[in-house]
């Protein structure tokens, strides 16, 4: 308990007065090499709670592509076909403005959430943390043991037992990476398309198989070698922390008011009070006998940290709010008969002023107002988008045909999107000017949540034409009701 050895990556230069963390990254050595971290296996209430949450989320992530609402997957981000599905609602390219407003609302929500709760998302919900800390790391603990055993194993000569352990670990890591790659692809192309790739003749799905192989190796590299570097150097959300959080944000925080001055138990025992009690703070400012804080400088909070930092230095970019240091310190507090929560969820201001954390500050109120407006817009556009929409374009490479009786014709291509859950009868009519439409394979029935394509000809009499280009308007009707109108042009001669 009172082992106060500093982890290797924190072997500070005595002259830095504890400020080295401001200019350096804990995972990079003075020579610029990677400091490989060996975080101790955490245990405690928060770790157990995070384990439960992570299993639920991992289950949801893998089941996601197969779960359907209204016959559509819960989430599909098909960039290739430009089809996006969120909770069973299909968004086509024509709905891009709604998606963009939805994305903006999401970004504002993330900013708002982060300003209040710091990187709570990173510790509890982020797939990188969940897979790394709750799956890959746990497997590593099972195969190679806790941090000291792993360190010993890595420094030991290559033996059959070492080869077996490393081989088993890497084999399992690759198998899980392969599964994650499949799941990842299913969110892009859909579970059915993935199933075809897996079950069909491989020669017919070389692109899909190459993508799975590539993703598998990327995930394998991330969880085997890159690890915490994703959070420290690669993740844009992590990099934005310094502008998103302030002194009122709730984060994993060391209570310096209670913890300082830190001192080893040995030192305290040498200097007992007159009544024989060991010096600890009871946070009573009137306690003139107070000499030390509750931190016994045991470094347990640092040894469990998966990003290798010392939370007692204050909030840092590397901290993913994983709560491992909270559990570690709580265990020490229980053993030393002090109240738990020396490292806890709190804001800097609440620790400094000894008050409760204030959730709503003027900045938070501003973000809330902005979020309400943008989210309201999103709901409005989503609620008022037409049931079906058409894209009508003149056929490329064609001009006009002159017909007998002074009439002219143009060819058009049409794509019609049904955004509802039901099949829909549809008909394209000419709204303006007067003329006729002759369908050339335009389907009159639209399957639910689907897209159909066709062609048609438009005939206009010369008396309706303007020189060169004549504005023209089509209406998309369903059951006799106009549901969408589309503007285009009709090309004719300069002197019709
Ligand atoms: S904060 Fe807690 S775990 Fe960390 S060194 Fe102090 S007593 Fe130990
Ligand atoms: S400082 Fe604590 S909460 Fe932050 S990453 Fe390290 S162990 Fe997790």
Image: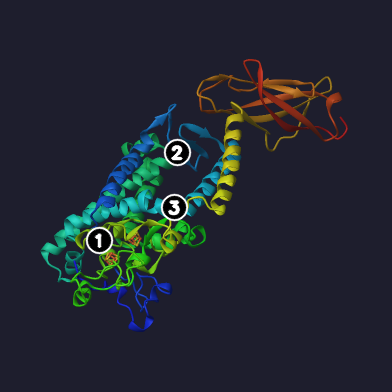
Q: Position of residue 155 (x, y in %)?
A: 19, 71
Q: Using residue 247 as the reference point, say whether residue 153 is left or right of it.
A: left
Q: For mark 2, give the secondary structure.
A: strand
Give the mark nearer the N terminus: 3 vs 1. 3
Q: Which residue is mark 1?
A: 338
Q: Which residue is mark 3?
A: 117
Q: Position of residue 486 (x, y in %)?
A: 69, 30
Mark 2 neighbour class, 10 Å CA radius: few under 14, some 14 to 19, many 20 or more: many
**Rendered residue at 57%/53% (across/down):** 362
293 up-or-down from 174: above or below = below
CA–CA distance between discs 3 and 1? 26 Å
Q: Nearer the viewer, mark 1 or mark 2?
A: 1
Q: For mark 1, give the secondary structure.
A: loop
Q: Nearer the viewer, mark 3 or mark 1?
A: 1
CA–CA distance between discs 1 and 2? 50 Å
Q: Nearer the viewer, mark 3 or mark 2?
A: 3
């Amino acid at each position: 308990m009172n082992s106060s050895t500093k982890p290797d990556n924190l072997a500070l230069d005595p002259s830095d007065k504890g400020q080295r963390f401001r200019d350096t990254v804990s995972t990079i050595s003075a020579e610029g090499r990677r400091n490989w971290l060996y975080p101790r296996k955490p245990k405690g209430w928060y770790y157990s709670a995070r384990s439960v949450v992570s299993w639920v989320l991992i289950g949801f992530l893998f089941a996601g592509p197969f779960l359907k609402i209204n016959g559509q997957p819960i989430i599909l981000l098909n960039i290739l076909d430009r089809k996006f599905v969120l909770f069973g609602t299909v968004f086509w390219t024509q709905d891009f403005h709604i998606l963009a407003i939805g994305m903006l609302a999401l970004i504002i929500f993330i900013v708002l959430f982060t300003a209040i709760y710091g990187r709570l998302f990173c510790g509890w919900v982020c797939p990188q943390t969940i897979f790394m800390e709750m799956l890959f790391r746990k497997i590593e603990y099972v195969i190679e043991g806790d941090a000291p055993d792993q360190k010993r194993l890595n420094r030991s000569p290559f033996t059959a037992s070492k080869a077996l352990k490393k081989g088993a670990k890497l084999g399992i890591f690759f198998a899980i990476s392969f599964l994650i790659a499949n799941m990842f692809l299913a969110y892009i192309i859909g579970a059915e398309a993935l199933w075809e790739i897996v079950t069909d003749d491989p020669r017919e799905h070389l692109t899909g198989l190459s993508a799975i192989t590539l993703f598998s190796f990327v995930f394998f590299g991330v969880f085997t070698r890159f690890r915490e570097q994703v959070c420290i150097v690669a993740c844009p959300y992590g990099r934005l922390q310094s502008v998103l959080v302030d002194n009122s944000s709730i984060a994993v925080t060391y209570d310096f008011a209670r913890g300082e001055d830190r001192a080893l138990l040995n030192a305290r025992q040498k200097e007992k009070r007159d009544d024989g009690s060991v010096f600890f703070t009871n946070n009573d400012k009137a306690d003139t006998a107070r000499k030390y804080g509750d931190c016994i400088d045991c470094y347990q909070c640092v040894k469990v940290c998966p990003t290798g930092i010392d939370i007692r230095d204050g909030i840092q970019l590397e901290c993913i709010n994983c709560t491992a240091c909270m559990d570690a310190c709580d265990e020490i507090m229980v053993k030393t008969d002090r109240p738990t929560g020396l490292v806890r969820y709190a804001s800097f201001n609440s620790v400094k002023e000894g008050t409760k954390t204030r959730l709503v500050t003027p900045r938070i109120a501003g973000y809330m107002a902005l979020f309400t407006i943008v989210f309201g817009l999103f709901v409005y556009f989503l609620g008022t988008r037409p049931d079906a929409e058409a894209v009508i374009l003149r056929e490329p490479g064609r001009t006009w045909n002159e017909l007998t009786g002074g009439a002219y014709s143009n060819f058009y291509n049409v794509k019609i999107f049904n955004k509802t859950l039901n099949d829909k009868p549809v008909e394209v009519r000419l709204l303006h000017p007067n003329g006729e439409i002759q369908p050339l394979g335009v389907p009159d029935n639209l399957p639910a949540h689907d897209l159909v394509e066709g062609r048609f000809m438009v005939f206009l009499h010369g008396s309706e034409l303007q020189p060169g280009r004549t504005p023209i308007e089509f209406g998309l009707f369903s059951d006799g009701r106009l549901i969408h109108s589309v503007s285009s042009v009709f090309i004719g001669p300069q002197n019709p």
